[in-house]
Amino acid sequence: MLASSARIPPPLAGNEAHDRMEPPTQETLVTAIAEALPTATDTRAVQIGRDVLPDVGTLFVGVFGAVPALVVADGHTWEAAGTRVVASLVAAGVEVLDPFVFPATPTLYADYAEVVRLREHAATTDAVIVVVGSGTLNDIAKLASGELGRPYAVVGTAASMDGYAAFGASITRDGFKITRTCPAPALIVAPLNVMATAPARLAATGYGDLIEKVPAGADWVVADELGIEPIDPGVWNLVQPPLRHALADPRGCAAGDVDAIRALAEGLLSSGLAMQAHQSSRPASGAGHNFSHQWEMEGHGLDWEPPLTHGIKVGLGTIASCALYEVALGLDVSTVDPEARAAAWLTPEADEARVRALQPVPLIQEPAVEQSRLKYVSVAQAADRVRAIQEAWPRIVARVRPLLLTADEVADRLHAVGAAYHPSQVGITAARLRRTYLQAQTIRSRYTMFDALYELGLFEGCVDALFAPGGYWSDWPTA
């Protein structure tokens, strides 16, 4: 449940942006998933449909053979689908061990301690884990299985995130949340009849996770144009071309419409398969995700019941990122003097001090310093980097404009799906949001538009412009 606020603004753009959306066609993204599967490194089978729970057992045997199964769930997902998954496995002749069921409340958090708990239990067996759940449960089972060197299966219960098919698990350890390396599931089953009846907040969080692929794609273009991280066309095509269809019906997702949930789920699965093929979250995660990671590492919303979800925060990060893009694309970067910028360039020691000042929480500070160090450009290379950005800028602008949505359009879609569409709705003040913009540039080595603006010496000025009179956040009191 979202925190209350003394000032929650009205929808930022009415329903105009939604009314312009193209409804999803009957020819959904199944084709994209079928085309993606051969590129997957770990996933061998994906089954998505209205009533596919009876197929779980047969699919399990086809993928894993004659091995025992350990069904993992929490109190909610066990009730939603757990008993039917067990029945299907038993009907297919699979030996099913006693299930491992986390409590329904308090809501499970993706902490490494829970990974250890499940891993140690599973280590006493030779079973393959079949996790019945969504984001947190999937990540815990994924990393536990990875550390045991075993494949696993997931039966999704909500269209709530893109991690079902993704390589790696987003887990907090020692207070710092990053994607931990581990294989994706060998088998994914997505029962749409279960997903469509999941709590509406879960579809909202899945929608928020998916919509960040919009600025994430633009961020990858920036890195591609600068030769920092070239785009893999095959992986790119798994995410970006199908994205608008997957996001086309936020109201239908909010209402639990099966066709809308199908489109959302398929978009999320396709995105996860892209990350699996790329062995990285780059195809689906840009600077907008960093807002969520920053707030989560600071503990914001984790003491709510249920906790403030990843996708809700990512949706707000998407608005923030798209708003910054609107400012950035209006810049004339040719006015930046490369030599003057190099003269003002921070030494490694000064840059480390900058990151430490932005990240006062000790558990965040040291990893942020390390992540920032990985993308630091030396003083000797500074002028050349600035010139490279200036030379690439017209191409960057031309390529990213067609990819992006405005911040208003993103906010309108999030409002339509029932997600938070303004940071004040989740207790984030304007002053804290401004600081988060600056912090978001420090917590991941992945290069984004935030880094290009920082290297040009324009980043903080662009952020300030968002809060100045006439800026996107200008009607929001900073006190």
Image: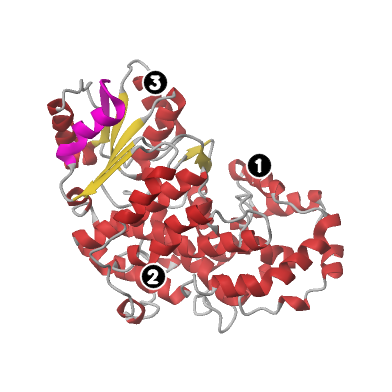
Residue 345 spot, x, y in % from top left = 81, 60
Which amino acid is tagged 3? Glu
Disc 2 and disc 3 in contact, CB within 8 angstroms: no
Q: Is residue 224 above or below residue 93?
A: below
Q: Which mark lies nearer to you, 2 or 3? A: 3
User: Which residue carries the number 1 mark?
Assistant: 366
Residue 216 spot, x, y in % from top left = 51, 60
Q: The N terminus lies in which quarter of the figure?
A: bottom left
Q: Nearer the viewer, residue 323 or 265?
A: 265
Please say which color scheme the image uses: secondary structure
Q: Quadrant of residue 346?
A: bottom right
Question: Spatial distance from mark 3 to mark 1, Cα to Cα?
Answer: 29 Å
Q: Which mark lies nearer to you, 1 or 2? A: 1
Q: Which of 355 and 330 is in front in this view?
A: 330
The region drawn magenta spans 53-71
User: Which residue carries the number 2 mark?
Assistant: 6
Which mark is first along the chain, 2 or 1? 2
Which amino acid is tagged 1? Glu
Question: Spatial distance from mark 1 to mark 2, Cα to Cα?
Answer: 35 Å
Which amino acid is tagged 2? Ala
User: Dot 1 surroundings within 10 Å: few (below 14), some, or many (20 or more)?
Assistant: some
Q: Looking at the image, which residue is at 63% across and 51% down?
A: 359
User: Dot 3 surroundings within 10 Å: few (below 14), some, or many (20 or more)?
Assistant: few
Q: Is residue 285 visible?
A: no
User: Which residue carries the number 3 mark?
Assistant: 120
The answer to whether residue 229 is left or right of residue 269 is: right
Which mark is first along the chain, 3 or 2? 2
Whether 359 is among the magenta residues is: no
Question: Spatial distance from mark 2 to mark 3, Cα to Cα?
Answer: 46 Å
Residue 211 spot, x, y in % from top left = 41, 62
Q: The C terminus lies in which quarter of the figure?
A: bottom right
